[in-house]
Amino acid sequence: MQVELGNTAPTTVAPDAADPDGVVWEPRVTYVNVPDEYTYVVADSAADLADETLKSLGRASAAGGVTHMPDQEALLSVNAAWGTQSSGKPTWVWSDNPEFQTLLAKFFDCPAGRPDDVEATHHTLAGAPGNAGPDAEAAAAVAVADAPSTNGEAA
């Protein structure tokens, strides 16, 4: 399963060498790939399942956290990955599995689904907000290379 989470408090973003001010880019999308063999329990109510999982995590936090919960490996893997990537809670969640997306939204208490303007507002795999992706960058580079010379000489 693929999961995306809206991250407004990234903890693992190193300042880019091209950014002398060391500005941390946010918000960004955090991506988690959950192995297909990881399971999660589909309950009659995603809310009840999320509540039970949160209780289990709460009980285990004093003992160093949950490292195994039968039939909830998928949820635990997303929760563990999120803990290494952000100091806040997700602003939204998306998954290619609608049932798991509902569970994650309830678990993290945030909206389900990508915002319509995610590419315009978040750093994604396509790059900075407003970037149309690698194809747009390549097209821009070709346009500059094909542009007539500006120094008065023939190209």
Image: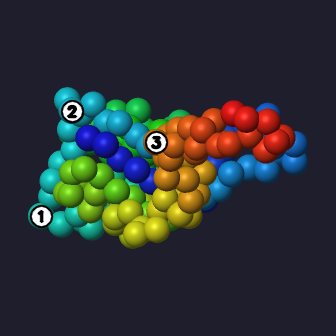
Q: Please state the horizontal and vertical placement of residue 90, each as a whole percent of the image.
A: 50, 59
Please name which of the two marks, 2 or 3, marks the residue nearer to the observer: 3
Rendered image: mark on residue 135: 3
Q: Who's the residue at 20% across and 38% down the image?
A: 39
The reply to whether dot 2 and dot 3 touch (C-beta < 8 Å) is no
State which quarter of the image contains the C terminus: top right
Q: Who's the residue at 21% across and 51% down the image?
A: 97
Q: Could you classify mark 3 by the number of other residues whose Cα lies within 10 Å: few (under 14), some (14-19), or many (20 or more)?
A: few
Q: Which residue is mark 1?
A: 44
Q: Is residue 149 above or below residue 43?
A: above
Q: Which residue is mark 2?
A: 36
Location of residue 20 by image quarter: top right
In this orientation, which residue lies closer to the viewer: 151 or 111? 151
Location of residue 116 by image quarter: bottom left
Q: Please state the horizontal and vertical placement of residue 1, each as a whole percent of the image.
A: 26, 41
- Tag 1's secondary structure? loop
Outermost residue toward the left in this view: 44
Residue type of the residue flagged with mark 3: Asp
| Of pointers 1 and 2, the one earlier in the residue sequence | 2
